[in-house]
Image: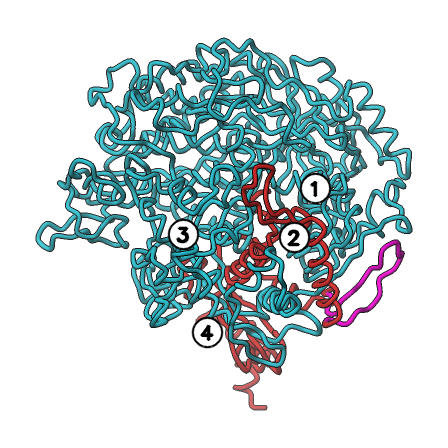
Amino acid sequence: MAEAHPVGFQWVMEAKRRGAKVFHVDPRFTRTSAVADTYLPIRAGTDIALLGGVVRYILDNELDFREYVLAYTNAATIVSEQFADTEDGDGLFSGYDPNTDSYVQTSWQYAGHEQDSGSGHTAKERDGAAGLIHESHGAQVHGQAERDETLQHPRCVYQILRRHFARYTPEMVERVCGIPREKFLELARAWAENSGRDRTGALVYSVGWTQHSVGVQYIRTGAIIQLLLGNMGRPGGGILALRGHASIQGSTDIPTLFNLLPGYLPMPHHADHPTFDDWVDSIRHPGQKGFWGDARAYAASLLKAYWGDAATPENDFCYDHLPRMTGDHGTYQQVLNMIDGKIKGYFLLGQNPAVGSAHGRAQRLGMANLDWLVVRDLFMIESATFWKNGPEVATGEIVPTECRTEVFFLPAASHVEKEGTFTQTQRLLQWREKAVEPPGDARSELWFFYHLGRRLRERLAGSPHRRDRALLDLAWDYPTHGPHDEPSAEAVLREINGYDVSTGRPLSSFTEAKDDGSTAVGCWIYSGVYADGVNQAARRRSRHEQDWVAAEWGWAWPANRRILYNRASADPQGRPWSERKKYVWWDPQAGEWTGHDVPDFERTKPPTYRPPQGASGPAALAGDDPFIMQADGKGWLYAPSGVLDGPLPTHYEPAESPMRNPLYGQQANPTRKVYAHPVNSVNPSPPQEHSQVFPYVFTVSRLTEHHTAGAMSRTVRPLAELQPEMFVEVSPELAAETGLTHLGWAHLISGRAVIEAKVLVTDRLTPLRVDGRIIHQLWLPYHFGYEGLVTGDSANDLFGITLDPNVLIQESKVGTCDVRPGRRPTGPVLRDLVEDYRRRAGIVPGERPPTVTTPVLRPAGRSDDGPREKGADHA
Amino acid sequence: MGLRTFVAGWPVYRQLTGTDPFGRGPAAQSDRSAGLTARTETADRVARSVCPYCAVGCGQRVYVTDGQVTQIEGDPGSPISRGRLCPKGSASRSLVTSPLRQTTVRYRRPYSTEWEDLDLDTALDMITDRILAAREQTWEDVDSDGRPLHRTLGISSLGGATLDNEENYLIKKLFTAMGALQIENQARI
């Protein structure tokens, strides 16, 4: 955190000054480790084993915050008797379908809900990255679930949890992660001791956690700990994701993502959502508890914002204008499709996949096989010059005079040359004022897309084609100003906020959204950012003039709420858990929730409220159900559906590992997304042969002085000067073993690429004793490329493409490689070196390694969706 | 110059008699530095902004003189950053004023070995043509069972995490209306 989010880290230091104990878990000793109380080096890719150990420690010693756990989580809920755990399945849960490498989730459901809840067959959900939708929706649960408040029932979630994590002992943590058991126990003890009625503990992760084939389950394990310890919805608690880009939260909320529409509404699927009603009901689950019950209003208002006057209740608000998903349309599938010649044109908007995405060579080969490419950036990035200066030009794989891609480079406006909002990592929107005009041809994306849309609509005017209706019906009338006709960002923000169609009055909250076409709302969760016609994101009351919650600086979604689910900061009766951790509570005199923050609960619903029989939507939430977006109002220790790779986290080895999984016969995530494409490959791991060809583990991360793919830092003089060169960090022991010398050169080889780097021999990396052997790890920064003031080979070239099944994010924080002293070869012989390694490792182009490495004991029966042909999605 | 002025101008004297016994502040200040004025004080205007690098969201004040950014500093009022900026945030004036910034449209013809210049207006027209052609070539109206698809898989986009919410909103809205489904950003990476 000190490295990649230095200014945020001041609050960790502030907490430390006040007595907090800081633990830092990282494969590499960093600036964060230097000031932490305890540093725990870990083998990359083993975090579930570490956190699972903490879960076991809490349960074994009964250190959970029992009153919170009973009232606010699903610990007491009884699970179906059909459920079988990984303990019984050698690493596989019940319901595994080896034909599709995915689960049928029927047996995971709550008892009595086997048929009416859950997702059924999940292969389709994986392709649609449906996990990202469930992240906010929760998943379906009908009616009331059976509970045992004594937590003694053998099939209650609490007991299932105990059995599932029983083997994650301190000894096992040491064996898997390489963390000595004393250090592990110090962490577990401190975490438990600093949680409860009077204290809260925070879990902070950076999004390297998401770049694993089990990334979502890493975070799930953290969530289990935080729920058991009562750290959710309370001040000083929570799970805090440190995201890496100025508005990456905003670009998820208002998604430039294939599977989502604004406010986490799913992009419709051709087979599941043929009609508007099918689509809306799949979101709101009629009869279900919680705020998604009002999804029809959010959906209708979005379509009204998109298609204006053309969108009416009679035509389902132009629902048929929306494009439909048929499978995986994610960025990696797209790149493989580019290589296969299926994609004509590609826009890059402030993004540099030639350096920043996994398998850089695949990225560049894909871009070299387009009809046209539009790059909008501040600087001439690698993704614009691959046809001229890329590594494949040097190897002869891309010949400029044979490369057909037409490239448009359009200069972009910087953050000071346009106005608008960023959403930072804690959901806070902050408006930026424009300082100066952009230079020359540089323009904002707002300008580019508004005028592009205007031209497209002018060109299509009068078109008879059905396909052009959605463009012609589009509400695309934004006021413009200035010499370049810049569209008004405030007008767009007002549409995002939503307004009453007849009066134009901006809505003050999403609770005012209607499903009859009388409101238009561009992103329902942002509703309120323009309440009273005031740009709330532009508020800048100084921290010196308000309390510590600072509610008048910017605006946080939803409803300017700073801590989500803050109903949980009070006990079931609505009283603060303690004076020290007082945050939001029930005021019986006034008959409303009050406190330091906007209560995340219906303001006047008393703690004693119990829903009447047959209630649904928000009205079905009891006065002590704090997790108001969940289908049962509870925090989920156990996830009966929504997470595709298991209701509970399980340690699997990374897709590339030098080790056999010490916990189960199942080696790696059995549901991981794998692409069997000739350009892609996975280095062999046990129980496969030849894993010793790539004997070392490597991981990558950021430097303080550089930013992601380097376009905004390798081009900036002070930053380029501070970190001028690509390097690799190795331990003295590994240097001795491989003949590397400090400040000399090394080259690293994987099944995809060979790259070179200067050698930094340092104690920051420690050889780990794991399962009776020594594992060496190397570390590289991933910022370098061949353009800019300072250049170097790209670390991401080493990775292949294997994805988390829930969100289709690639495993690019751990892989295997070999390392050798000296510089890499240049020219065509470079590929010969990679080919030599591939041959020795037994890698066959287009062939995927075995997914299942243990007998499937309790396979899934046929499901409604039917078995899917294996590999059908790779076509 | 009188003796008193001469003695008072001597740093050691100021250090011994003044409020700066360690000689790190006013005692050590030369006449030249005492006469300097910070460019933040003489700026024509200040824009309230936010750092463009990571997602912490540190407040920035952007100082402008004669239409040029002359300084970017941390905003001391911010409850997030309390006026601090990291090395990257501190370098953001160098980012926006970098001589390496591209300020004109560049165009590479198929099979060409060099960049060419291109007028911005022409570039937009050419991109409009190509979008329409790609849609025409790759449009899918319905699936094999006659259910609507209403899309093109011939167009892709990547990016958004460094852009404004308003920009992402228009990007998603326009691409969706175009039938372009394959819109992605760093949140998938």
What x and y, as percent, mark residue A604?
17, 51
Sequence-wise, the earlier of marks 2 and 3 is 3
Q: Looking at numbered disc 1 in the image, what kind of residue is underneath it?
A: Val
Q: Which chain is red?
A: B
What's the distance in space between the residues labelled 2 and 3, CA to CA?
30 Å
Name chain A's colour. cyan
Q: Residue at x 73, y 38 (%)?
A: A797
Looking at the rendered structure, the secondary structure element under dot 2 is loop
The residue nearer to you, when weighing B180 against A405, is B180
- By secondary structure, the bulk of the magenta-drawn segment is best described as loop
Q: Does the magenta segment cover residue B103?
A: yes
What x and y, as percent, mark residue A127?
56, 34
For the residues labelled 2 and 1, say whether their Cβ atoms are less than 8 Å apart: no
Q: State which chain disc 1 sits on.
A: A
Name the residue that disc number 2 marks: A351
Q: Looking at numbered disc 3 in the image, what kind of residue is underneath it?
A: Ala
Sequence-wise, the earlier of marks 3 and 1 is 3
What's the distance in space between the residues labelled 2 and 4, CA to CA?
58 Å
Q: State which chain disc 2 sits on.
A: A
Q: Does the magenta segment cover residue A601?
A: no
Name the residue that disc number 4 marks: B17
Looking at the rendering, which quadrant does residue A308 occupy? bottom left
Q: Is residue A219 above or below residue A294?
A: above
Q: Looking at numbered disc 4 in the image, what kind of residue is underneath it?
A: Thr
Label 2 neighbourhood size at 10 Å, few (<14), some (14-19), many (20+)? many
Q: The C terminus of chain A lies in which quarter of the figure?
A: top right
Q: Closer to the camera: disc 3 or disc 4?
A: 3
Q: Which residues are magenta?
A: B102-120
